Image (cartoon, coloured by chain):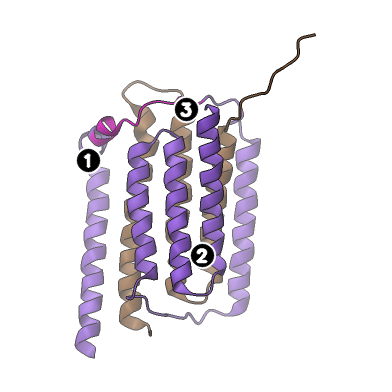
């Protein structure tokens, strides 16, 4: 009977999707739970980061189609990161107008 | 995915999730900003372990920028008037969302997906962003422009009203 050696550590698409689900849920929790709306803004980049992680993971684990479609997930992750920064900039600006120190 | 990438992925995932939970529960803004910076580093590490180096750089800059904005001196407190019951319902809904997403991830047919690692591909990604999918890039650029103009107008009207 052949004795199996130590198996190499690996991470599959399910692990990537679990992490993405955790980031999205933590972001939604921050947005819902915090009374201060400026803190609740911090949930937006977390949710966008979770969505970007899912996109990047699926594109990396998907079979490479012709035409460089494997980069589509990375592209969406980049655009989501920029959109999250824009949302936070606008939110902090509006909160600075209406809020108190 | 080889062992080195897998270790990097799990460490980065732990850092980002711990940072996110710290943002939810830490009391003062400086520590929350540091925690959001940890989220930025963790997410960049996840992208890096998925062979998405350019996306990792952009994520580090953008989510790090969010952390600087939310920890900086321009921070103002803006309390909502939402009742506690609704906030608690929102927290429960986020837990339900986690369970639903985890259920979909585990019971989907994703166990047999293979990892296709590769180079960072920043040149190919740039070609997609600025040639193939230029409309999406311009839409996000318009969003950034609107956000910056709106934020500037908000700050100027606040200074004028003082």
Q: Residue at x 33, y 59 (%)?
A: B65
- Residue A62, label in figure: 3
Q: Mark 2 points at which residue?
A: B23
- 10 Å crowding of disc 3: few (<14), some (14-19), many (20+): some
Label 3 vs label 1, nearer the camera = 3
Instruction: Give the magenta range.
Output: B115-126
| Callouts 2 and 3 on one subunit | no
**Which quadrant of the view contains residue B36?**
bottom left
Do we see residue A84 in this rendering?
Answer: no
At x 37%, y 61%, the residue is B66
| Mark 2 residue element | helix
Measure the C-alpha gap from mark 2 to mark 3.
33 Å
Mark 1, residues whose alpha carbon is within 10 Å: few (<14), some, or many (≥20)?
Answer: some
Q: Label 2 crowding class (10 Å Cα cut-off): few <14, some 14-19, many 20+?
A: many
Q: Where is residue A69 in the image (x, y as percent from the top left)?
A: 36, 28
Queried whether the magenta region covers residue B118, the answer comes back as yes
Which residue has dot 1 on it? B134
Question: Can you tell which chain is drawn purple?
Answer: B
Indicate whether residue B25 is drawn in magenta.
no
* Chain that appears brown: A
| x then y, percent, for residue B117 | 44, 26
User: In 3D space, how far apart are the residues under numbered discs 3 and 1 (Cα atoms)?
Assistant: 23 Å
User: Left or right of B131: which side holds A7?
Assistant: right
- Parent chain of label 3: A
Indicate which disc, 2 or 1, sits on the residue closer to the N terminus. Answer: 2
| Residue, far bottom | B162
């Amino acid at each position: 009977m052949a004795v199996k050696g130590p198996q190499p550590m690996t991470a599959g698409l399910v692990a990537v999707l679990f992490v993405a689900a955790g980031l999205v849920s933590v972001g939604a929790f921050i947005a819902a739970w915090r009374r201060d709306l400026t803190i609740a803004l911090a949930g937006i980049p977390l949710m966008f980061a979770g969505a970007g992680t899912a996109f990047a993971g699926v594109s990396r684990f998907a079979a490479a189609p012709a035409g460089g479609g494997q980069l589509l997930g990375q592209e969406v992750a980049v655009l989501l990161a920029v959109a999250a920064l824009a949302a936070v900039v606008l939110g902090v600006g509006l909160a600075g107008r209406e809020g108190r120190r | 995915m080889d062992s080195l990438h897998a270790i990097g992925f799990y460490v980065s995932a732990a850092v980002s999730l711990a940072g996110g939970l710290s943002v939810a529960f830490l009391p003062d803004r400086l520590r929350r900003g540091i925690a959001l910076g940890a989220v930025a580093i963790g997410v960049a590490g996840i992208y890096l372990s998925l062979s998405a180096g350019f996306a990792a750089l952009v994520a580090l800059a953008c989510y790090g920028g969010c952390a600087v904005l939310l920890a900086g001196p321009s921070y103002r407190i803006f309390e909502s008037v939402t009742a506690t019951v609704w906030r608690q319902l929102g927290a429960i809904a986020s837990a339900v969302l986690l369970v639903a997403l985890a259920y979909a991830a585990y019971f989907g047919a994703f166990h047999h997906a293979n990892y296709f690692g590769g180079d960072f591909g920043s040149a190919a990604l740039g070609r997609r962003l600025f040639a193939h999918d230029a409309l999406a890039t311009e839409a996000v650029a318009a969003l950034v422009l609107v956000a910056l103009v709106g934020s500037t107008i908000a700050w100027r009207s606040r200074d004028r009203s003082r």
